[in-house]
Structures are given as C-alpha cells and as structure tokens.
C-alpha cells in the first residue's frame, strides 16, 4: 500500500479558478514537502511543512499541514497556465530520515 | 547558480553495457541521493550518501552501485544494465532534510 496518497490523480481547471490538491499519510509525518514537476523534467521545491497546523504561502500557492501531521493540502488561487504540471508531495517520517517517500503525483492542467 | 547537475540527460544503451550517470552539486551539501521515477510506481530511492565515503541502500538498490569519493560528486553506476532499469533517474542533494532537497533535471535511460 502507498504510504502517501495524493488526490486527485489528475485535475483540469479553467484558468482563474481555485483548486486544492491533497496528500494523506498512513502515519504521522516528520516533514512534508511539496514539489512541482514539468513532464519529464526535474522537481522544483515549493515548500516544506514540519509543524502541526503550519501554513506557508508562496505567491498564489498555499500549503497547510494538519494538526495531526498526517494530511497536507496545496491550494492554488486564481490558477494560471504557468501552474500546470505535476505536483508531488514527499515526506520523511522521522528526524534524521535519509529518504523522502513520495506520493504518486497530481497532474494539473489549466485550460484557458 | 546553486544546482545539481546530472549527465547525460538522455541515454540509450544495450543490455549488459556498463554505464555511469554523473551527479554533481555546487552547494557543499553533505547529503546526496538517487531516485528513479516510473509510471505507476512514483519516485523510489535507490541509494543515498550522508557524507564522503558513507553510502547506504535505499528501497531499490539491486543492479546499481554508487560511490562518494568527494563531497560534490555522487555517480550512479549500472554494471550490467537490463531493460527493467529503463527509467527516469534523479539525483538530489540537501544540506539537511530540514532545508529541503534540490533535485537535478533528470536522466532518461533506455536499456534495449
């Protein structure tokens, strides 16, 4: 079974609309990372969340980690074509962990 | 510019012909790691290194070797590539997990 589940797997929204991507863990996280990937290219680091209830924003993207540290959401406000890509959540489950476990990704398409 | 550089970006090779994918980072990061990305399986860690001369297996190490003789370089070696090693490979580095991971642009390997 997958340690990190992302939903939805794919998402098509009209330009200007808001959207949310979810990442759910089967156990308590130590750190939660959000990345964006253009198809077949490298991963671009967006944000890292570590504290229960933490929320971070970068431009029109906001990420939150729930109090129990098992679920995170990524919210995009007023989506633009530049937001299109694959969004990946990654997590480590203990301090000093030397790997990230990744979700399957959410493919976001923005229609003009 | 701070970055992780992988070479080559694309490689087609034949079964059994030894190859090396290079990875270099210019951020003086101690931690480096290799991942492979496959459809339906997501990103999985192959090997990681916490510092020079310190390497350890990730989730899918079979068929791969690594070395860390100097801090900036972490090559991935396939001694006898097989078709099931056809994949998109990413190298990543980090100062520490709390600082996030910087990924390279990826190497798309095809073994025929």
Image (tube, grey):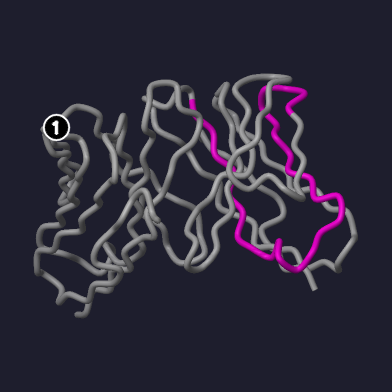
Above or below residue B42? Residue A16 is below
Quarter the N terminus of chain A occupies: bottom left
Mark 1 highlights which residue? A54
On the image, the x and y values in percent for residue B63 come to: 77, 50
Residue B28 in view, yes or no: no
User: Which of the 4 image quadrants contains residue A2?
Assistant: bottom left
Label 1 Cα crowd, 10 Å radius (few <14 / some 14-19 / many 20+): some
Quarter the C terminus of chain A occupies: bottom left
Q: Please tell me which residue is depicted at 26% across the width and 34% down the height of the picture.
A: A28
User: Which of the 4 image quadrants contains residue B92?
Assistant: top right
On the image, the x and y values in percent for residue B20 come to: 80, 48
For the view shown, which residue lies furthest in the front direction?
A1
Check the residue under mark 1 and report the chain it is in.
A
> Image check: B43 left or right of B48?
left
Q: Please tell me which residue is depicted at 33% across the width and 49% down the height of the picture.
A: A89
On the image, the x and y values in percent for residue B50 come to: 59, 22
Residue B43 in view, yes or no: yes
Q: Please tell me which residue is depicted at 43% across the width and 44% down the height of the picture.
A: A101
SS under mark 1: loop
Above or below residue B19? Residue A47 is above
Q: Of A62 and A21, which appears nearest the observer?
A: A21
> Image check: B54 left or right of A112?
right
Span of residues in magenta: B68-94
On the image, the x and y values in percent for residue B25 come to: 61, 33
B53 drawn magenta: no
For the view shown, which residue lies furthest in the right direction?
B17
């Amino acid at each position: 079974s997958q340690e990190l589940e992302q939903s939805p797997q794919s998402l098509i929204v009209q330009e200007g609309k808001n959207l949310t991507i979810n990442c759910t863990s089967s156990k308590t996280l130590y750190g939660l990372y959000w990345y964006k990937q253009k198809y077949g290219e490298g991963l671009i680091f967006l944000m890292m969340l570590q504290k229960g209830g933490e929320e971070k924003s970068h431009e029109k993207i906001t990420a939150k980690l729930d109090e129990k540290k098992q679920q995170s959401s990524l919210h995009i406000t007023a989506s633009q074509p530049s937001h299109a890509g694959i969004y990946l959540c990654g997590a480590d489950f203990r301090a000093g962990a030397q790997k990230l476990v990744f979700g399957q990704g959410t493919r976001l398409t923005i229609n003009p | 510019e701070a970055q992780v550089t992988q070479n080559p970006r694309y490689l087609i090779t034949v079964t059994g012909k030894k190859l090396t994918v290079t990875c270099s980072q210019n951020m003086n990061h101690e931690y480096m790691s290799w991942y492979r990305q496959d459809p339906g399986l997501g990103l999985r860690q192959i090997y990681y290194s916490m510092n020079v001369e310190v390497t350890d297996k990730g989730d899918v190490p079979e068929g791969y070797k690594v070395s860390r003789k100097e801090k900036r370089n972490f090559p991935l070696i396939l001694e006898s590539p097989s078709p099931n090693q056809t994949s998109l490979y990413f190298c990543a580095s980090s100062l520490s997990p709390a600082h996030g991971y910087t990924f390279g642009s990826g190497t798309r390997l095809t073994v025929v």
